[in-house]
Image: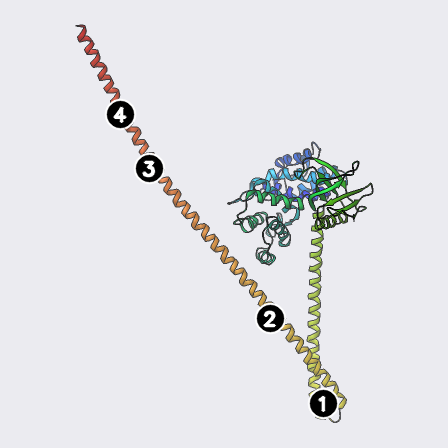
Amino acid sequence: MSALLKNVTNCIWYAFDSLQNNAVVHKSKLKVLTANIGTLLDLYGVEKGLEHFRSSQELRFEEFRHYLQQEVFSSLPGTLALPALREYERKISEVCWLVCRKSLLCRERPLFADDSVFKLFRIFCLLADLVQDCDDERQFVMILQPSEAGIIVEQLVHCLGLRWDAAEWDALGAGVGHLRWAAFLAVLESKYCRGQHLHEEALVEAVAEIYDVFIEDIIKKGYLLKRGYLLPTMREYWCVLQPCALTYYKSSSQKEQCGRITIDEYCSVEAAAGDGKIQRFQLVTPERTFEFATQDHKSRLQWVSALKQATAVSGGAEGYQRRARATRRGADARRAREAREARARLQQEVRARLAAEAQAQELAEIAQQDNKKLEEMKNAQVTLEKLLQEETQAKRDEEIVRALQARVLAEEWEKREELERLQEEQNKMLEEERLKRKQFEMLQAEKEAQYREAERRLQELEEEKKKLDAELKAAQQKISRTEHTAQNLQVH
């Protein structure tokens, strides 16, 4: 599978999921999606092969993914530059979002703007896993590990200037388990953003900040002083650091790019002598040496550290966050393997201890028999005493293990009580929401009754108006006849 298809598979699955019916989608709908993807990749007519792909008129997701790999993405170059790869990912994600946004934006009390939800959707697709549904093997589901979700939530909380409670998140993750998109968005909006008296602009900026970190792979950004190439003067630029490049702009709006420095494993960062007012450092590349400066020593340390990190992770065709995710997954798998090995060793030790206890018991029985001949078997008595000491030590070890087990059970009981408390709080919140909804329905019924009464009164007034109009018309006719009679009398 190509790197691009691998990176956008999750987004494509959401588009497929919004179109599917009983785990399949008709080819006519897939042709539109395939044509749009092909147009973004400058490939035209790639959807025509769907008609002859497979004998059925409907495809499952793994079949559609296989077609995309063979007929669409295989036409791209074997390796793409990282900026081009990111641009393709962004365009394909936008197309998939247009297909599935209606279902993914549906929620009762929205807090994030639609554009922010799209950015969160891309971050979710970056870190989530597409797995088979346990209830239906033909279906796939997108799930996010609690540890990965915690990384996103922690970044968002820090960007909002709030306090991050890791223990609280661990308890919530243990209770919720794997998160799907709706649950992930609900946790962000209801628990960590709602009720914090946050402005909409703050939420937009916070989401944009974590979007830059996870999707754009921005390690650091801020103002730096840079020495010119022709004129040796220091000018201030807004700098954005990514694993592959340091781009600098005229302002933080990032609309006017002034230059871009490619960063690779051959680059290095060195501190330079300052003049007391500014703190200088140098970025050494194979082509030339760039000199930068900050206003204080702390900022220089931060930029030097960030540049060294960018140099270290500059290699490879994948983005920094994708490689970090793969590293975390490898570490999790390694920890799980070590845990299994530790359990196996513990079981072996338990079996060995049980065997030792059985052997000690047998030797104790022999010792009891040999005590009758104490004077004849002094050497056997010494051996028996040693065995008894070993048995005592084994019992002590057993007591230690039981104490540890008791402590683990106590901790588990505490966690269970905390989970029950959270469930009670959630039930209380749901009950309050039901009461509010009932009050709103009563108020709405009252307004409807008032509206019907006003409508009835309006009809009565209209009927009275018609009667008055008729009376007025009759009076006018009567006056007209009277005037006509008076004119006749005057004539005669």
Q: Residues within 10 Å of mark 1 (few under 14, many from 20)?
A: some
Between marks 4 and 2 in the image, the one whose residue lies nearer the viewer? 4
Mark 1 and mark 3: Cα distance apart in space: 108 Å
Q: Would residue 188 be visible to someone looking at this image?
A: yes
- Pick whichever of labels 1 and 3 is earlier in the sequence: 1
- Pick whichever of labels 4 and 2 is earlier in the sequence: 2
Q: Residues within 10 Å of mark 4 (few under 14, many from 20)?
A: few
Q: Residue 458 vs residue 65: left or right?
A: left
The residue beneath circle 4 is 468
Mark 4 and mark 1: Cα distance apart in space: 131 Å
The residue beneath circle 2 is 406
Between marks 1 and 3 in the image, the one whose residue lies nearer the viewer? 3
Q: Which mark is residue 453?
A: 3
Give the x, y percent position of residue 395: 66, 78
Residues marked 4 and 3 touching at CB (< 8 Å): no
Q: Residue furthest front?
A: 276
The residue beneath circle 1 is 370
